[in-house]
Amino acid sequence: MVDCSVKLELPKWYDLHAHFRQGEIVAPLLKHHLRMGCAGVVAMPNTRPPVAKVFDSDDHPYESIERYLAALRPAGADEAFEVIVPLYLTRDTSARMIEQGVSSGLLRAAKYYPPHGTTGADQGWHLSGFMDNGVFRAMEEAGVLLCIHGEEHQMAAEQYFDRHTNAEAFFYRERMPRLLERFPRLKIVAEHLTTQVAVEFVHQAPDTVAASITPQHLIYTVGHLLQGLRYHLYCLPLPKFDEDRAALRQAVTATDNSKFFAGTDSAPHTEKVTSCGCAAGCYTGGIAPQLYAQAFEMAGSDLASEEGVDSFRRFLCLNGPRFYGLPIPKETFLLERAEQEITPLRLAGQEIVPLPVGMEGKGESPVSIPWRCLE
């Protein structure tokens, strides 16, 4: 029988992969993260234009880390809230840009997007370009983390999502081994894993490699996306098959897990289906720890037990900041196993549909999840 009275007091946690966009919507999005016990974030740089230069004074026609951080601070990301903005890697990125960014203290991580591989990845460049132009070498020498969207680009549709292979599996079989061989000291975050192949790669990789996993990839499979075409689950990388989800669940719930941590990839799309296709990303702001707790229990973890809580704490609160070199907060937050109703949101005059609501397709009707966060 499930113990319905469970309360978990946990160190505040870091969402090490989240999207906050630009303009008036940033403040309410940040507020949602604060309300769910977040101590800091890695704010993804695929804005428009992308955050692809360090200083505002640089000549390139991009947003800068300097200016984006300045926009996030008054929106709610004060000095007590840790914010890392990775540099979006483009064909204009140079080793000198990396070196100067590190010297300024603004540059701590950089993000690789496969060209046109996801929403906002149209400025991405092929991986081999950064391997050969000195960028990855400069990052390795300066200790800059590489956040990597691990999917192959420009694949034939038959290979992109096939029974025996897919864009992520190909990338971790073919590209990542070469990257590690060339740059063995480069710290790499393999982001939003979805496949058994990628999980096995991270397990076997040296301690310079760790990985983030989203709540949606722990809870759902591609069948949930396709059955009734629940497009609110459409994200990239796509959810995969049951054996892949099982590998993810086993990785995060393992009692000795030290490599896998929370990164929601929460994406506040105000228009999910467009004339260009379906926007990739699920909104889980405000409810991510609750969904992770739900996923752990779905995986068979007993969050009323010391062992279950320890595994959950490792994944949500400890492994990520340790890999990023961030302090473990002394402040705590509470999770309680009690139903929480979720409804569509109205933020800065725009509607955002949280993932659980979109999966139920109930419009304005509330949808319940089994955990809630206590402020």
Image (cartoon, rainbow, N blue to C red):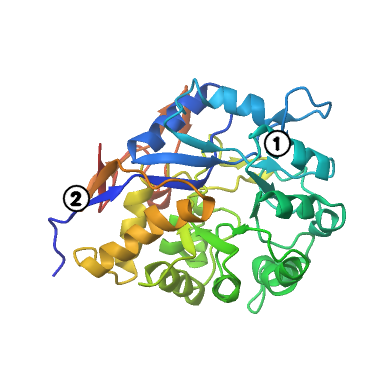
Q: Amino acid at mark 1?
A: Ser
At 58% from the left edge and 76% from the top edge, which residue is drawn? 204
Task: Name the residue carrying label 1.
Answer: 103
Element type where label 2 sits in the image = loop
Among the two numbered marks 2 and 1 on one chain, the one whose residue lies closer to the N terminus: 1
The CA distance from mark 2 to mark 1 is 48 Å
The image position of residue 280, as x and y in percent, is: 59, 48
The image position of residue 174, as x and y in percent, is: 74, 73
In this rendering, the answer to whether 24 lies above or below 171 is above
Question: Pointer 2: residues within 10 angstroms few (<14), some, or many (20+)?
Answer: some
The image position of residue 354, as x and y in percent, is: 42, 43
Left or right for 124, reference 71: right
In this rendering, the answer to whether 270 lies above or below 122 is above
Q: Quadrant of residue 54?
A: top right
Element type where label 1 sits in the image = helix
The image position of residue 140, as x and y in percent, is: 71, 55
Query: The N terminus is located in which quarter?
Result: bottom left
Residue 338 marker: 2
Q: Amino acid at mark 2?
A: Ala
- Whether residue 115 appears in this view of the structure is no
Query: The C terminus is located in which quarter?
Result: top left
Left or right for 93, reference 24: right
Instruction: Pick the residue in front: 304 or 195.
Output: 304
In this rendering, the answer to whether 79 lies above or below 117 is above
Front of the two marks 2 and 1? 1
Question: Pointer 1: residues within 10 angstroms few (<14), some, or many (20+)?
Answer: few
